């Protein structure tokens, strides 16, 4: 794999790239650390250190060529996946089914959905550790730069505008539960956002803890339009299925979605609840209505799948905070 599109002077073997990807999946090691370790290993077994091809006899810099080769390899993988999708005629439903056949696969002929039960249960949550520094890069990712599991800013724009247009309709909604939820409060957190362009990630997973859809949180808290955009994407893809949604402030989301009419007729296909560990800080009336342990049709789902996923992705926080924005969204995939 050449390290540059024209007049390449360095090539990286594909097995070497595959080695890095396997190591990265287990440790999230950044390019610089991986190349530094390989260089140290090779220099210790060579009579002469690797030097750059210049008169200054500087040490060989392999991080940038390796980064460029990795980018080219990732693009080839994307093209390959797109080709397979087109050749096999995969529909959006097929893609979802490949992620979790149990939740999104076809219904079996002898399978009966209990009255009022959801076909699948989705957990949502935001994480403000996955931030991105302003100074790291000035590039602006296009829609094509985002992985398939990301809701792009252009897809969120319509929901964002509708939420702003219906602010007056939400004035009478009781927000006693959401007021105690710090992540949704812009005022309390604005001082910590000044140095970041992306202030976090908002994501979703099914009840089997399989990641589904994500979106970047931009200069705000967990705004209403983030869960609405993900939920709308799922409901549009599966027009005949009912979904249960467990969210830290599911009561707040339910009230606003109904009052503002953010989901239209699709609202009848959504059951709202609060994630189990957060439910007990809500007032008693809210718990009776939204706590999955006090209501039927939720099974043993606790809605904390995203918390477990954030724990698994914690190794990505440091390396991606100073990465370019294009690399950030691709590596989050």
Image (tube, helix red, strand yellow):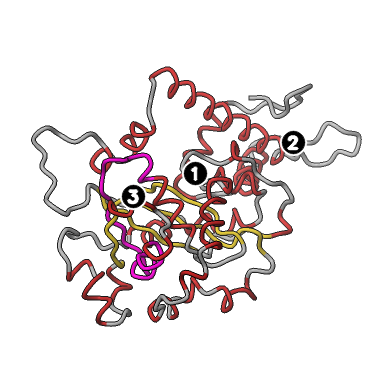
For residue 247, which quarter of the picture? bottom left
Q: Which element type, helix, strand or loop, lies under badge 3?
A: helix
The answer to which of marks 1 and 3 sits earlier in the sequence is: 3
The magenta segment is 234-257
Q: Is residue 256 magenta?
A: yes
Residue at 69% x, 41% y: name it.
63
Image quadrant occupied by the N terminus: top right
- Name which of mark 2 and mark 1 comes first in the sequence: 2
Q: Are marks 3 and 2 in contact (CB under 8 Å)?
A: no
Side of 330 where 212 appears, left or right: left
Question: In the rendered image, which residue does mark 2 sit on?
Answer: 50
The location of residue 309, given as percent across then percent down, is 39, 56
Q: Dot 1 corresponds to which residue?
A: 333
**Secondary structure at numbered mark 2:** loop
- What residue is pinned by disc 3? 266
User: In the rendering, at what x and y percent does residue 216 appear?
Assistant: 55, 54
């Amino acid at each position: 794999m050449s390290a540059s599109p024209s007049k390449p002077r360095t090539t990286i073997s594909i097995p070497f790239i595959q080695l890095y990807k396997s190591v990265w999946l287990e440790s999230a090691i950044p390019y610089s650390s991986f190349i530094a370790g390989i260089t140290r290993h090779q220099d210790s077994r060579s009579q002469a250190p690797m030097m750059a091809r210049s008169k200054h006899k500087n040490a060989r810099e392999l991080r940038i060529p390796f980064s460029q080769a990795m980018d080219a390899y990732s693009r080839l993988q994307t093209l390959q996946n797109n080709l397979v999708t087109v050749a096999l005629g995969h529909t959006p439903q097929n893609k979802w089914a490949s992620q979790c056949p149990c939740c999104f696969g076809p219904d079996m002929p002898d399978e009966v959905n209990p009255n009022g039960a959801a076909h699948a249960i989705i957990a949502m949550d935001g994480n403000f550790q996955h931030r991105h520094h302003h100074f790291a890069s000035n590039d602006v990712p296009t829609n094509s730069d985002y992985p398939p599991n990301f809701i792009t800013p252009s897809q969120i724009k319509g929901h964002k505008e509708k939420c702003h247009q219906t602010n007056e309709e939400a004035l009478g909604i009781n927000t006693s539960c959401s007021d105690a939820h710090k992540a949704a409060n812009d005022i309390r957190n604005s001082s910590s956002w000044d140095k970041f362009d992306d202030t976090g990630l908002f994501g979703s997973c099914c009840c089997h803890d399989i990641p589904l859809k994500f979106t970047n949180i931009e200069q705000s808290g967990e705004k209403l339009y983030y869960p609405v955009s993900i939920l709308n994407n799922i409901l549009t893809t599966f027009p005949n299925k009912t979904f249960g949604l467990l969210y830290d402030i599911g009561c707040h989301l339910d009230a606003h979605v109904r009052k503002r009419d953010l989901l239209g007729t699709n609202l009848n296909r959504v059951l709202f609840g609060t994630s189990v560990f957060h439910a007990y800080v809500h007032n008693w009336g809210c718990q009776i209505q939204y706590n999955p342990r006090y209501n039927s049709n939720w099974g043993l789902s606790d809605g904390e799948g995203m918390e477990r996923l954030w724990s698994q992705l914690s190794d990505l926080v440091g390396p991606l905070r100073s990465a370019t924005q294009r690399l950030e969204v691709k590596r989050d995939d």
